Image (tube, rainbow, N blue to C red):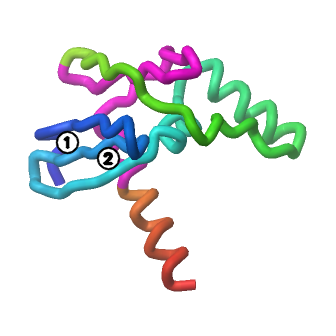
Amino acid sequence: MSGYPRQIVNNRQRRVLDIVWSDGSAQQLSHAALRAQCKCTVCQSNRLLAGAMQIAPTAPAADVRIDDIRQIGVYGVQLVFSDGHERGIYPWPYLRELAITRQEDSIDASAA
């Protein structure tokens, strides 16, 4: 498993980020899932607060989309969302982990 993407394509129409990693594996992440998993301090605080209050965190709008992708050195990318959120930085290992987790969730759901 390689740590860097070979290609990232923002499919705005389908609202997914297509990632091809340097080891050849390809993965897709929905814009809404990426927005929901933002690791900026504001988003993490909101999730922690919701958990402490035992309520579900506020989900991003289903129609949220990624409007811009800004590379942050060799570290990862900053995603700019249509709801104005642009604080989160997604390091390559975190994107890879999200993609693998989403893929496993899909497999579990289809087996049920």
Q: Which amino acid lies under the numbered mark 2 shown in the image of this protein? A: Arg
Q: Is residue 43 left or right of residue 92?
A: right
Q: Position of residue 83 (x, y in %)?
A: 58, 21
Image quarter of residue 9: top left
- Please say if 110 is above or below 35: below
**Highlighted range, magenta:** 74-99
Q: Please tell me whether residue 1 belongs to the stretch shown in magenta.
A: no
Q: Is residue 85 left or right of residue 79?
A: right
SS class of the residue under badge 1? loop
Label 1 near label 2: C-beta < 8 Å?
yes
Q: Which amino acid lies under the numbered mark 1 shown in the image of this protein? A: Gly
Which residue in the protein does label 1 denote? 3
Q: Nearer the viewer, residue 84 or 22?
A: 84
- Label 2 Cα crowd, 10 Å radius (few <14 / some 14-19 / many 20+): many
User: How far apart in space, not on screen, are marks 2 and 1 (Cα)?
Assistant: 8 Å
Q: Nearer the viewer, residue 52 or 18?
A: 18
Which residue in the protein does label 2 denote? 96
